Image (spheres, rainbow, N blue to C red):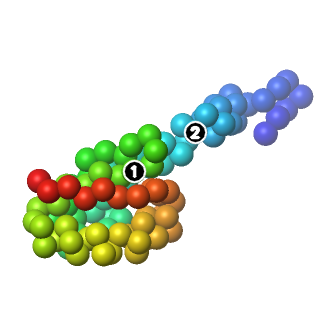
């Protein structure tokens, strides 16, 4: 929003963050602390999100090979669920703990 004196500082900062991809990265990074709320208690109990890489890849540690296999099959649905909550994750890499 502009006024006769120029652009409001908050609007200028928001535009800068958006134009430089920082806003998207900030939204992606919130996946880590919000993980239990995003995926539910059952999945959160056997996983730990580690990082969201610059390319939008989420790295998640998994407690067992059986769970890792199950989660790999569930990945498309998990990504859709994340996207519905405003988290645009390109892919998920599942790793053993």
Residue 45 visible here: no
At horizontal 12% and vertical 67% (from top left) the residue drawn is: 65
Within 10 Å of the Cα at label 1, are there few (<14), some (14-19), or many (20+) other Cα atoms? some
Q: Secondary structure at mark 1?
A: strand
Q: Is residue 20 above or below residue 73?
A: above
**Could you give the CA–CA distance between mark 1 and mark 2, rounded to whole angstroms?**
15 Å
Q: Residue 57 shows which numbered tag?
A: 1
Answer with mark 1 or mark 2, whichever residue precedes in sequence.
Answer: 2
Q: Is residue 47 left or right of residue 59?
A: left
At horizontal 50% and vertical 68% (from top left) the residue drawn is: 84
Q: Which residue is mark 2?
A: 21
Q: Farthest residue in the right direction?
A: 4
Q: Quick one: 85 or 76, which is closer to the camera?
A: 76
Q: Quick one: 49 or 90, which is closer to the camera?
A: 90
Residue 80 visible here: yes
Q: Quick one: 43 or 69, which is closer to the camera?
A: 69
Q: Is residue 9 above or below residue 72?
A: above
Q: Residue 77 shows which numbered tag?
A: none
């Amino acid at each position: 929003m502009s006024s006769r004196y120029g652009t409001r500082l908050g609007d200028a900062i928001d535009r800068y963050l958006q134009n430089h991809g920082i806003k998207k990265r900030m939204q992606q990074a919130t996946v880590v602390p919000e993980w239990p709320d995003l995926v539910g208690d059952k999945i959160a109990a056997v996983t730990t999100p580690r990082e969201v890489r610059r390319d939008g890849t989420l790295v998640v540690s998994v407690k067992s090979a059986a769970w890792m296999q199950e989660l790999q099959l569930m990945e498309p649905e998990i990504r859709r669920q994340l996207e519905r909550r405003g988290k645009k994750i390109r892919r998920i890499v599942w790793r053993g703990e």
